[in-house]
Amino acid sequence: MNKLELISTLKNEANISKAEAAKIVEIFFDSMAEALAQGERVEIRGLCSFYVKNYKSYTGRNPKTGDKVVINPKRLPFFKCGKELKERVDY
């Protein structure tokens, strides 16, 4: 399912306009992204949680040349599946 399909499903299930459904989806995704950018954890009980992992700087290698390269510190978002979602998918 992609974003447009999600909007279409919300439109049909909630009996609202496509514009309203698109606005709701945008607010939801923007709120999640903003919380993650601030380092907060986003948890949707029974479904999943999103959190940010911090990585320190380290020395890596360029795969083509073999030269050492310094990798800057970074923060990456991670997804963790909830128990209910695991059970629903595995049925």
Image (tube, helix red, strand yellow):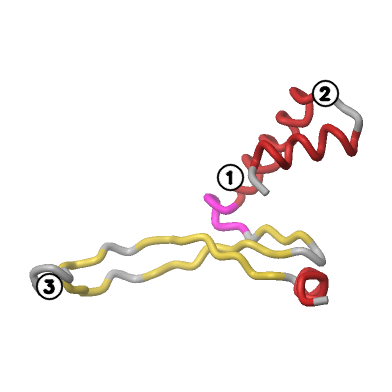
Crowding around mark 2 (Cα neighbors within 10 Å: few <14, some 14 to 19, many 20+) is some
Q: Give the mark toward the camera: 2 or 3.
A: 2
Residue at disc 2, secondary structure: loop
Q: Determine which residue is flagged by label 3.
A: 68
- Residue denoted by label 1: 34
27 vs 33, left or right, is: right
Residue 17, disc: 2
Residue 46 falls within the magenta-colored stretch = no
Label 1: state its secondary structure.
helix
Comparing labels 3 and 1, the label whose residue is closer to the camera: 3
Q: Which secondary structure, mark 3? A: strand
* Residue positioned 76% across, 59% down in the render: 44
Q: Quadrant of residue 82?
A: bottom right
At label 2, the amino acid type is: Ser
Q: Residue at x 24, y 66 (%)?
A: 71
> Which is more toward the observer, 50 or 6?
6
Q: Which residues are magenta?
A: 36-40
Which residue type carries mark 3? Lys
For the C terminus, the image quarter is bottom right
Disc 3 + disc 1, Cβ < 8 Å: no
Q: From mark 3 to mark 1, how far is it between C-alphas?
A: 34 Å
* Left or right: residue 62 compared with residue 25: left
**Closest to the observer, 86 or 54:** 86
Question: How far across and down, in percent of the image, does residue 45 sit?
Answer: 80, 64
Q: Is residue 12 above or below residue 76?
A: above
Q: CA distance from mark 1 to mark 2?
A: 26 Å
Q: Nearer the viewer, mark 1 or mark 2?
A: 2
Most frequent secondary structure within the magenta stretch: loop
